[in-house]
């Protein structure tokens, strides 16, 4: 088993449980989307994978990269994982790079940390990484302020892939970029997975994720409430939250005057009442939703939904499989 | 035809930059009849926010006129400028920085009234604030809170209430929902639609998100490197773009399969626009797959009239 596997991850910080139950998997060569709104716990999930949680956090569940357990691991083990086996890129590349050092120097530092090789071999790795993101060797000498936003994000990606990680986590990698640049970065990320690297793409934008991800997980209030093949999930969502989110997204050429909205507020992270996290805002809520945590159902092969009253594809109502 | 809510003519703005003046705005012209809304779209650096700032006279334009209610605000003195500003409201991208963190919501909302209707007294002011806040969906309890006690969507509602408190006919919206979550964005867009219909508002809607344009506006201007490259009714421009840049923008909107024709290899050089070329050559030529020698030599004719593209080799109907 390789790739990234998160099972029943829960994180508590004081009285709050910002991550209630997250289960997800990224297989080698696979592009997986993790979609949710602000505060749903998607970035916290990423930080947990790298062992970068705030010190007062308590956790349960498991995170594995290959056969290595990451959650609760010591610093020495984490240092060998971060950058080498599991790399991450962030939303704002300018704040993730050091303004005082050239791009080449910063990439060399990262590669030198993980490979004890002579300098020419390390330089070759850096050049190869820059070539893969289509930045020429001249970018080695440049400083962050001399690059455009799209070039900076590519330099960040080069840094992340320079050690050939098994999985790359990209947290809102294009939010700070223009749409035409965004389209290019998305294509680049997808191409990088052709050589076996897994990609976890975190975004608030379902439409963006659907362009590149083979599978998608939807997070709400700290839970992965639905997952499945991208095309199926976009065409017929089973969880009422996913369905509402898809309808609330404005789309080009879809001339509708009023966007359907999701009424109400997200459940606070301090709420410990039983039942479904979406119940208060859900139009399909039934009596059971307030009483107990919804079951995890498999409505189609490869898809899961946590719901008492899911939206069923017409013919499948009879064959619910409890997991 | 009734008088335009706003008429902008020949608006220009340049900044000092390395290697010459940067042409941030190379001539903007439009007029909005009452109740019609216009979207200005483009990427970072296209000049869309510069346009909004110059129109609101928050930045000083180099040339041009902005006629509001019969008077040119750019030619007005300080006192006239303040008076003319009551004809439009402004909603910016980040609601948290639009409101004073130490001032209660209802007091922020009445600030325009204190400037323009100084005769109004305390209880009346509060009543006006509460009525407008209720209209945008914020109750009395919200009115007495401080900005940090509200969510992003609630704050943006408060900013909208302030923009409408003087009942202007024009509201300038500069990326009003780009800091909000998808579900909150839907609520704010719906509110803006309702208010537009109820108060017969005209919006000048600045956005990079093409999917929002047809929700709020009937007309669209596409800007690139400070120039208007295409203009027309939204459904016509989006269905049959004539300028290659408009076509590129539309192809990049998420929600459709990634187009393999976006060339990544030459992107670093090709992403650059020519900001300094003052009057000659097309600013988009470095990125344009259709560019020919003529595009470097002559500037294409500006996009004027109700439906136009500023391009020597526009896309024909069969190519779109």
Image (spheres, coloured by chain):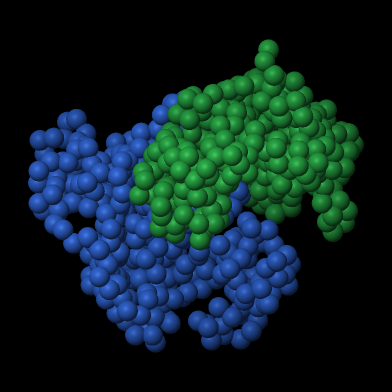
Chain colours: A blue, B green
Q: Hey, which quadrant is residue B242 in on the image?
A: top right
For the N terminus of chain B, the quadrant is top right
Residue at the image point whose x is 55% and y is 40% from the top: B120
* Direction top: furthest residue: B1
Give the residue drawn at x 65%, y 33%.
Answer: B87
Q: Nearer the viewer, residue A212 or B311?
A: B311
Q: Is residue B77 above or below residue A2?
A: above
Relative to A217, residue B175 above or below: above
What residue is at 73 percent from the left and 72 percent from the top? A141
Observer-nearest of A314 and A246: A246
Give the x, y percent position of residue A270. Answer: 25, 63
Residue sitting at x 53%, y 37%: B165
- Residue B178 screen position, x and y as percent: 52, 47
**Is A308 placed left or right of B310 in the picture?**
left
Residue B270 position within the rendered picture, expressed as x and y whole percent measured from the top left: 72, 48
Q: Relative to A149, say whether A212 is above or below.
A: above
Residue A232: x and y in percent read 31, 39
Q: Is residue B295 visible?
A: no
Left of A165 or right of it: where is A231?
A: left
Towards the viewer: B124 or A39: B124
């Amino acid at each position: 088993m390789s790739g990234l596997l998160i099972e029943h991850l829960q994180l508590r910080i004081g009285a709050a449980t910002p991550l209630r139950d997250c289960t997800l998997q990224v297989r080698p060569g696979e592009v997986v989307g993790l979609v949710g709104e602000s505060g749903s716990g998607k970035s916290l999930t990423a930080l947990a994978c790298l062992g970068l949680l705030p010190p007062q956090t308590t956790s349960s569940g498991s995170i594995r990269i290959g056969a290595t357990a990451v959650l609760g691991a010591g610093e020495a083990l984490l240092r060998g994982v971060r950058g080498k086996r599991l790399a991450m890129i962030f939303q704002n590349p300018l704040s993730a790079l050091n303004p005082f050092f050239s791009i080449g120097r910063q990439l060399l530092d990262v590669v030198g940390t993980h490979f004890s090789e002579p300098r020419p071999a390390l330089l070759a790795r850096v050049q190869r990484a820059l070539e893969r993101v289509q930045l020429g060797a001249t970018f080695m000498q440049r400083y962050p302020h001399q690059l455009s936003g799209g070039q900076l994000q590519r330099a960040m990606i080069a840094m992340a892939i320079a050690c050939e990680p098994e999985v790359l986590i990209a947290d809102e990698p294009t939010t700070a970029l223009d749409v035409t640049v965004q389209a290019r970065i998305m294509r680049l990320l997808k191409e990088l997975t052709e050589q076996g690297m897994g990609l976890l793409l975190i975004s608030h934008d379902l439409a963006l994720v659907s362009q590149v991800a083979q599978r998608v997980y939807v997070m709400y209030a700290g839970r992965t409430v639905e997952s499945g093949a991208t095309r199926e999930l976009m065409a017929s969502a089973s969880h009422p939250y996913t369905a509402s989110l898809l309808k609330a997204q404005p789309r080009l050429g879809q001339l509708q005057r009023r966007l359907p909205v999701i009424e109400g507020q997200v459940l606070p992270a301090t709420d410990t009442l039983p039942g479904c996290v979406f119940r208060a805002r859900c139009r399909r809520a039934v009596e059971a939703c307030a009483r107990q945590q919804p079951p995890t159902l498999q409505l189609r092969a490869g898809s899961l939904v946590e719901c008492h009253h899911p939206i069923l594809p017409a013919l499948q109502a009879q064959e619910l499989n409890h997991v | 035809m009734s008088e335009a809510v706003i008429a902008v003519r020949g608006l220009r703005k340049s900044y000092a930059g390395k290697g010459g003046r940067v042409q941030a705005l190379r001539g903007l012209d439009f007029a909005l009849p009452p109740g019609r809304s216009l979207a200005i779209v483009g990427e970072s650096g296209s000049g869309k926010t510069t346009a909004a700032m110059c129109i609101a006279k928050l930045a000083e334009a180099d040339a041009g006129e902005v006629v509001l209610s019969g008077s040119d605000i750019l030619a007005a003195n300080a006192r006239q400028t303040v008076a003319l500003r009551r004809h439009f409201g402004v909603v910016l991208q980040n609601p948290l920085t639009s409101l004073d963190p130490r001032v209660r919501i209802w007091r922020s909302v009445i600030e325009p009234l204190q400037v323009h209707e100084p005769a109004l007294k305390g209880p009346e002011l509060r009543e006006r604030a509460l009525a407008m806040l209720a209209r945008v969906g914020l109750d009395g309890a919200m009115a007495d809170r401080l900005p940090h006690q509200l969510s992003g969507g609630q704050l943006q509602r408060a900013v909208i209430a302030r923009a409408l408190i003087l009942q202007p006919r024009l509201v300038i919206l500069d990326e009003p929902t780009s800091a909000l979550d998808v579900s909150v964005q839907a609520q704010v867009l719906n509110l803006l639609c309702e208010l537009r219909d109820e108060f017969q508002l005209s919006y000048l809607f600045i956005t990079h998100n093409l999917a929002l344009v047809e929700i709020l506006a009937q007309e669209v201007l596409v800007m690139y490197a400070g120039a208007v490259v295409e203009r027309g009714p939204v459904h016509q421009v989006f269905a049959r773009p004539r300028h290659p840049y408009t076509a590129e923008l539309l192809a990049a909107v998420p929600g459709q399969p990634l187009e393999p024709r976006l060339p990544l290899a030459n992107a670093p050089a090709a992403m650059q626009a020519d900001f300094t070329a003052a009057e000659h050559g097309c600013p988009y030529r470095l990125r344009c797959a259709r560019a020919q020698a003529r595009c470097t030599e002559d500037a294409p004719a500006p996009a004027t009239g109700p439906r136009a593209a500023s391009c020597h080799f526009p896309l024909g109907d069969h190519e779109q």
